[in-house]
Amino acid sequence: MHAHIQQRIQGIINNLDQLPSIPDVASKVLTMVNDPDISFKAIAEEISKDQAITTNILKLCNSAYFSKGKEISSIDRAIVTLGIKEVKDIVIVAATREVLNKIIVGYDLARGELWKHGIAVAVLSKKIAIMKNKKAVADIAFTGGIIHDVGKTVLALFVQNTFREILELTQARQIPFAQAEKEIMGFDHQEIGEKILSKWKFPEVLKAIVRHHHEPEKSPAEFLPIVSIVHIANTLCLMAGIGIGADGLYHELSDTAIKTLGLSNRELEELYRDMPQILDQATAIL
Ligand SMILES: [Fe+2]
Ligand SMILES: [Fe+2]
């Protein structure tokens, strides 16, 4: 372990100011959606305060993945046509894109590799939620998918050389990314990610996803199903080579996650077979 790197990361983690911020509207909308007394109007007003985000949201509403065929030209219409949960997903995509879709210097994989991975995991997580009759949490699965590796993005942005060193170690020793992170920095991207979500005032369930997506068995029981969904989606995407450069080559599906969701081998194979389609759908959001 490199003491100076560890100190640097500790500094970044302890000083929330150094961590990237996201537009206020994202955390506000996340909270508002969970409040049964809140009106559609109030949510639409909150979103409309941010002009840049609003433009992006409308573009996403009309994209192949979210569109219901009808042209949408206002946030009010979007909520009526797509529903509030779908609009919340879109707000999160628009708000996090700026932070998570950066060109990563010193990281020679294609631009936006981590972002593409996040979106693919989001689309697949939502699909698994619907497949396993957990439609009520499909929106959380989607949001969790987008941000599950947020800690990695921050690492790649703030300690570029360290990020490269971690990647090299995963390849040289054929170990998982999180293990290489621990060896080099004393932290893994799950811990860093959780700190970022605290700064962004994201709810506990999303923190649990970020924290436990590699080891769902460590998740608090109440969040286990949703953490399991993102874990399976993440692992299947990595196995299919979506985001492979950003992680080691060793990906194991957790038994706990498979049992929790009651996924059969046939269902897992089906999900894996649908990967090209998942990637197409993700590309429509990029
Ligand atoms: Fe991860
Ligand atoms: Fe991942």
Image: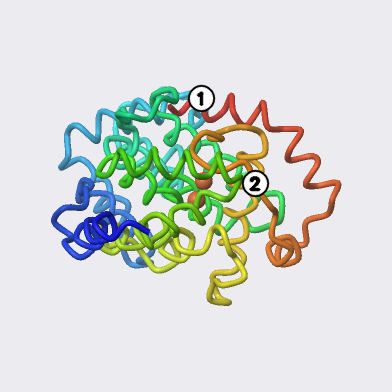
In the depicted structure, whether residue 107 falls above or below residue 19: above
Task: Identify the residue shown where x is 54% and y is 70%.
Answer: 223
Task: Identify the residue shown where x is 31% and y is 46%.
Answer: 154
**Image quadrant in which you'd find residue 127:** top right
Task: Identify the residue shown where x is 33% and y is 39%.
Answer: 100
Is the image coloured rainbow, by chain, by secondary structure, or in one colour? rainbow
For badge 1, the amino acid type reads Thr
In the drawing, does residue 85 fall left or right of residue 172? left
Residue at the bottom extreme? 221
Q: Nearer the viewer, mark 1 or mark 2?
A: 2
Quadrant housing the C terminus: top left
Residue toward you, 37 or 140: 140
| Residue count near mark 2 (Cα–Cα under 10 Å), binned few <14, some 14–19, many ≥20 | some
To which residue does mark 2 refer? Answer: 250
Q: Residue 178 appears at what percent x and percent y?
A: 49, 54
Q: Which mark is residue 283?
A: 1
Quadrant housing the N terminus: bottom left
| Residue count near mark 1 (Cα–Cα under 10 Å), binned few <14, some 14–19, many ≥20 | some
Helix, strand or loop under label 1 = helix
Helix, strand or loop under label 2 = loop
For badge 2, the amino acid type reads Tyr
Residue toward you, 159 or 16: 159
In the drawing, does residue 263 fall left or right of residue 186? right
